[in-house]
Image (tube, rainbow, N blue to C red):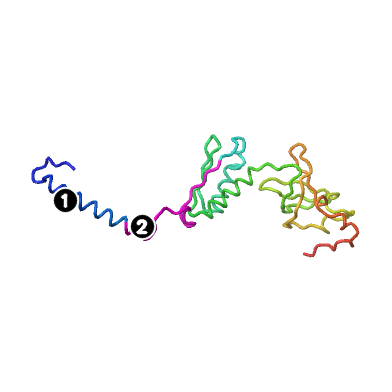
Amino acid sequence: MDIKIKGVSFEIMEIALRQAKDGRLHILGVMNEVISAPRAELCSFAPTLATLQIPTELIGSIIGPGGKTIQGMQKEFGVDISIEDDGTIQIAGPDAESANKALTRIRLMTTQPVVGEIYDGVVTKLMEFGALVEILPGKSGLVHISEIDLKKVHKVTDYFKEGDKVKVKLLRIEGGKYSLSRKALLSRDTATQADEKPIED
């Protein structure tokens, strides 16, 4: 825009600016023919940055011993996860799906179980007196043998095997331990039905 240089007159600058304006308007017109406004959402295949705030006391559970937990999630979902001292978590993923999967996992890991709530759990261990069921990532509770069914249960293995998905209700939290019940979700009508058959492998 500096026209103090010899040989560049005001007239030349006026013509150049007019041509530049016409060119810009032409380019904008072509762009508008393709898309006239920004998309409401990013393409699902576009790199995505997700942010989540968690209580600072839960940072350790996300990192895990020696960074095992956070490294495992980064490898599983193909994302980069960074955690600030104030509990801010940033997830950089190659696409929205990967970032959202990691975000969902972290939300579940930082969710505190609520007494009276119903959870879709997974049986992780069988014992003579009951079964351990994981109701949230890293959070497991005991379904005592007396809380498995409305009728008397003689063997836990007649009802569960490791890896089974089971719906349970959280009865109480005592000393950081979760007491779960399958029986609380069963209809009383089942008490009059024939005994269930043992689970087949």
Q: Nearer the viewer, residue 144 or 30?
A: 30
Q: Residue furthest bottom?
A: 200
- Please give the residue where the numbered disc 2 appears in the rendered image: 32
| Front one among 13 and 53 | 13
Task: For label 1, count other residues whose C-alpha is less than 10 Å away and answer few (under 14), some (14-19) or many (20+).
Answer: few
Image position, residue 197 (x, y; %): 85, 63
Give the left or right position of residue 101, taking residue 174 as reference: left
Tag 1's secondary structure? helix
Number of the label disc, if any, that sits on residue 29? none
* In the depicted structure, whether residue 85 falls above or below residue 117: above
Residue 197 lies within the magenta run = no
Name the amino acid type tagged 2. Answer: Asn
Q: Is residue 156 above or below residue 8?
A: below
- The crowd level at tag 2 (other Cα within 10 Å; few <14, some 14-19, many 20+) is few
Please provide percent x and percent y for residue 136.
Answer: 68, 48
Q: Name the residue at 44% across, 54% down.
A: 39
Residue at (49% x, 55% y) in the render: 95
Which tag, 1 or 2, sits closer to the chain's start? 1
**Left/right of residue 48 with respect to residue 34 in the rendered view:** right
Horizontal relation, residue 5 to residue 51: left or right: left
**SS for tag 2?**
helix
Coordinates of residue 77 in the picture (x, y in percent): 55, 53
For the residues labelled 1 and 2, the Cα–Cα distance comes to: 26 Å
* CB-based contact (under 8 Å), mark 1 and mark 2: no
Residue type indicated by callout 1: Ile
Magenta segment boundaries in residue numbering? 29-52
Image location of residue 14, percent across then percent down: 16, 47
Q: Which mark is residue 15?
A: 1
Q: Residue at x 34, y 57 (%)?
A: 31
Asked which quadrant contains residue 35, the reply is: bottom left
